[in-house]
Image (spheres, helix red, strand yellow):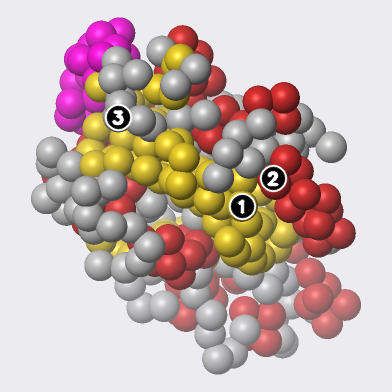
Amino acid sequence: MSFRNRISLRDAMRGIVEEPLLPMVPKRFDYIGNVAVISIPPELEAYKKSIASKLLSMRGNTRAVLNKVSKLEGEHRVADFEFLIGETTETIHRENGYTYKLDVKKVFFNPRLYSERRRVASKIKSGENIIIPFAGVGPFVLPAAGKGAKVYAIEINPNACACLQENIRINRLEGQITVIQDDFENLFHMFNSAKTSEGLVNTTFSSLHVCLNPEEAKDENFQIPENGFDRAIVPTPYGMDHFLGKISKLVRKEGYIHFYTFKAESQIPVLIDEYKKMGLEVELYRRTGNVAPGISRWVFDLKKIGLKEESVETVGNK
């Protein structure tokens, strides 16, 4: 999880980093398993090794320290890292009773959302059919399956799919989760073609890339629920709010959507109004972290009460 110490890193670097540069020492950093990840500004180039050593000493089981040198890029949502200490980016991360095996350089994983993932899992009932696009290595997927849900996890990054399939095995959740390696945009068009005026039909797709294990993926039949999914969990990447309109079409009436978006607080009232026009009732919304000056990640717990087709493509494009 994101690690907070009694003494901050900035305080710990006092006397090492020159006083005028001390405010540039990052306040936040993450531990993913035994790998520490930090973003050190260029002004502190001369102090990178000292900062890495301090991070190493602040948590005893740390084996590597990485400097994040780019933002998340590409459809696989991965960043570039510089090794400061250590030789491997593979690690085992434990969160909320589940174990995740992953490679920090090859997949996206945000340890700061551990309490939010626990909150969402607490709402899931056994027997639900749940769809989770942008599934990553499974931090929303495994807890949902652990509650007895049948989960359809969609992820385009083949490395993340391989990790997720391995994590399913490690956590003994085989049979509860179907992992589909594909772009959700493509998948949506397939689902939408099976939709009638009465809703989704009980359709079997034979051309989906269903991952069976870390070494093998092949086409296998995949059947969507007759009336739609009971719940969708959508950890949306930045700037992709249009997926809410698409995912809502796949959720049954009275079903739930947990939707994540990046917005300024001033945008929230307008967003709530747009969701209502889409036939989505806002049961809860809350900030789940700051990502840039004035911009936060927000989660909306939405209940589908009736869809207005003319509005579904417009939300989030403001």
Q: Is residue 161 left or right of residue 37?
A: left
Q: Earlier in the sequence, mark 1 or mark 3?
A: 3
User: Disc 3 residue type?
Assistant: Pro
Query: On the image, numbered disc 1 is attached to which residue?
Result: 281
Give percent across and percent down for residue 203: 29, 15
Query: On the image, numbered disc 2 is attached to which residue?
Result: 275
* Residue visible at 38% across and 32% down in the picture: 228
CB within 8 Å, label 2 to label 1? yes
Disc assigned to residue 225: 3
CA gap between label 3 and label 2 equals: 24 Å
Above or below 162: residue 61: below
**Nearer to the camera, 124 or 169:** 124
- Residue 36 located within the stretch drawn in magenta: no
Q: Find numbered disc 1 in the image and state the secondary structure of the residue it sits on.
A: strand
User: Disc 2 residue type?
Assistant: Tyr
User: Disc 1 residue type?
Assistant: Glu
Disc assigned to residue 120: none
Point out the residue furthest to the bottom here. 6
